[in-house]
């Protein structure tokens, strides 16, 4: 047996070179943005072997980076046996084609957008999530389709029998037409799913259950917080974009009111426009919320930039005006000085550690307080034949006291404006 060496079946990580260009002033420095790109590459299973940067007044139209830097990149690719070069900013189709020609096959040239789309493709689990990712990928690929079938075009120039009829469409045009057709099909399917989601959302609205949405930068700990609050077992892992598909769980507050909490896709700076567009139906869960919990990784030194990136996307999807409470997560990782600094910067935030449970009770109290905003006290007599309304009283209201009398349920409750309107016909004098 000693003569035979067992072969490893573990996948060999691709060797990646990262390239960033510093152009003018930006909230994120080139080094910070590339550090995040390295985490994205690691999430996608690549090993970063080199990081290159260049300062330019503007990207070079043909190759994004300057001629000397291209030569340096080509040398590095061959010296380090790199498999893929990842640019931190989106490349135009022509820039990508030119760089591929200069670097040479089989090395791949991709950008941040393509990398994020690849990660999304791996992590999308639901039917809708996979459709959304496929749509974004096809929208990205369409302008980048080029002469993979150029040998067929050459045949059109030959003479001979049948040449006067031509070759018809080139394969490239066929490919483009097929991709456009698939994009249209995906749009229709996603619109159908969005209509179904709107019906479900309207049902939740009609039921009056208070809706909370968790938003935040990717890897801020939203899924861990959802699990801690609701006792569920949503997939959690220390990697970027571990959660793509929205997950909704019910939560019973101590006062008796029921709320729903929805975990959503994590945001990131330079989030590709095609992704935001494709995931609008998913992000509609955020727009439909009564309260947004903006989950922040308090231990991350870039937290202020991350908050800015999240708020930017919220504005983009029409959720910028929603009631929002900041939740500083992972406070157990801060020393006393850093904790004081975080509290000073975010005096109204809830301080929690989803991992250890610190501050969760205070957060639940805050959610209950927000859910009770605008509530009024009233006493109602709900007839026994109104069983659904009785259920709504217990789920949607804070029941102060109740007793069953001959005519039905006599209860004094605190109810929001919608529920108070529903209960209007059953309001009675408070006998107490």
Image: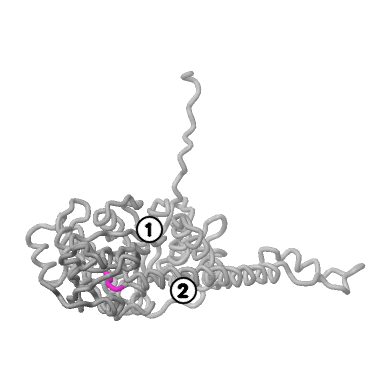
Callout 2 environment at 10 Å: few (<14), some (14 to 19), or many (20+)? Answer: some
Q: Secondary structure at mark 1?
A: loop
| Badge number at residue 277 | 2
Numbered mark located on residue 194 in the image: none
Q: Work out which residue is located at the far top of the displayed protein and give it.
A: 1
Q: Nearer the viewer, residue 379 or 195?
A: 379
Residue 202 at x, y = what percent?
A: 41, 73
* Residue ID for mark 1: 243
Q: Residue furthest right?
A: 161
Residue 179 percent coordinates (x, y): 63, 68
Question: What residue lies at 24% left-to-right and 74% top-to-bottom?
Answer: 324
Q: Outermost residue toward the front? A: 406
Indicate left or right for 138 with 166 as reference.
left
Instruction: Find the magenta span and give its range.
Output: 290-294
- Name the residue at 70% across, 69% down: 174
User: In the rendering, at what x and y percent does residue 88 appear?
Assistant: 40, 67
Query: Pointer 1 and pointer 2: residues touching (CB < 8 Å)?
Result: no
Judge by depth and name the residue closer to the eye, 414 or 234: 414
């Amino acid at each position: 047996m000693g003569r035979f060496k067992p072969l490893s079946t573990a996948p060999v990580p691709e060797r990646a070179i990262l390239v960033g260009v510093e152009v003018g002033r930006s909230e994120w420095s080139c080094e910070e943005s590339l550090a995040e790109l390295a985490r994205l590459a690691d999430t996608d299973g690549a090993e970063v072997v080199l990081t290159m940067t260049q300062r330019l007044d503007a990207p070079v139209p043909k190759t994004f980076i300057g001629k000397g830097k291209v030569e340096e990149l080509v040398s590095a690719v061959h010296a380090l046996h790199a498999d893929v070069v990842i640019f931190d900013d989106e490349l135009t189709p022509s820039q990508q084609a030119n760089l591929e020609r200069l670097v040479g096959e089989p090395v791949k040239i991709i950008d941040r957008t393509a990398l994020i789309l690849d990660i999304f493709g791996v992590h999308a689990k639901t039917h809708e999530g996979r459709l959304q990712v496929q749509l974004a990928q096809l929208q990205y690929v369409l302008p980048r389709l080029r002469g993979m079938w150029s040998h067929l075009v050459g045949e059109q120039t030959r003479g001979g029998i049948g040449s006067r009829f031509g070759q018809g469409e080139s394969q490239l045009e066929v490919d483009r037409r097929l991709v456009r057709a698939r994009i249209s099909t995906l749009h229709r399917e996603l619109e159908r799913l969005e209509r179904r989601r709107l019906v479900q959302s309207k049902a939740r609205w009609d039921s009056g259950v208070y809706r909370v949405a968790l938003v935040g930068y990717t890897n801020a700990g939203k899924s861990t917080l959802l699990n801690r609050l609701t006792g569920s077992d949503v997939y959690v892992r220390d990697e970027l974009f571990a959660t793509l598909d929205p997950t909704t769980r019910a939560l019973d507050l101590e006062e008796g009111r029921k709320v729903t909490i929805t975990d959503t896709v994590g945001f990131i700076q330079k989030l590709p426009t095609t992704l935001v567009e494709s995931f609008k139906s998913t992000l509609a869960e955020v727009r439909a919320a009564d309260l947004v919990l903006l989950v922040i990784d308090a231990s991350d030194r870039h937290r202020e930039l991350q908050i800015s990136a999240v708020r930017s996307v919220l504005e983009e999807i029409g959720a910028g005006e929603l009631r929002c409470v900041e939740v500083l997560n992972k406070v157990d990782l801060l020393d006393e000085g850093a904790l004081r600094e975080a509290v000073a910067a975010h005096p109204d935030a809830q301080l929690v550690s989803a991992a250890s449970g610190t501050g969760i009770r205070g957060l639940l109290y805050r959610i209950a307080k927000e859910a009770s905003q605008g509530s009024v006290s009233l006493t109602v007599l709900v007839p026994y034949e109104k069983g659904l309304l009785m259920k709504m009283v217990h789920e949607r209201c804070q029941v102060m006291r109740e007793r069953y009398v001959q005519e039905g349920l006599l209860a004094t409750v605190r109810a929001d404006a919608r529920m108070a309107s529903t209960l209007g016909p059953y309001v009675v004098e408070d006998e107490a």
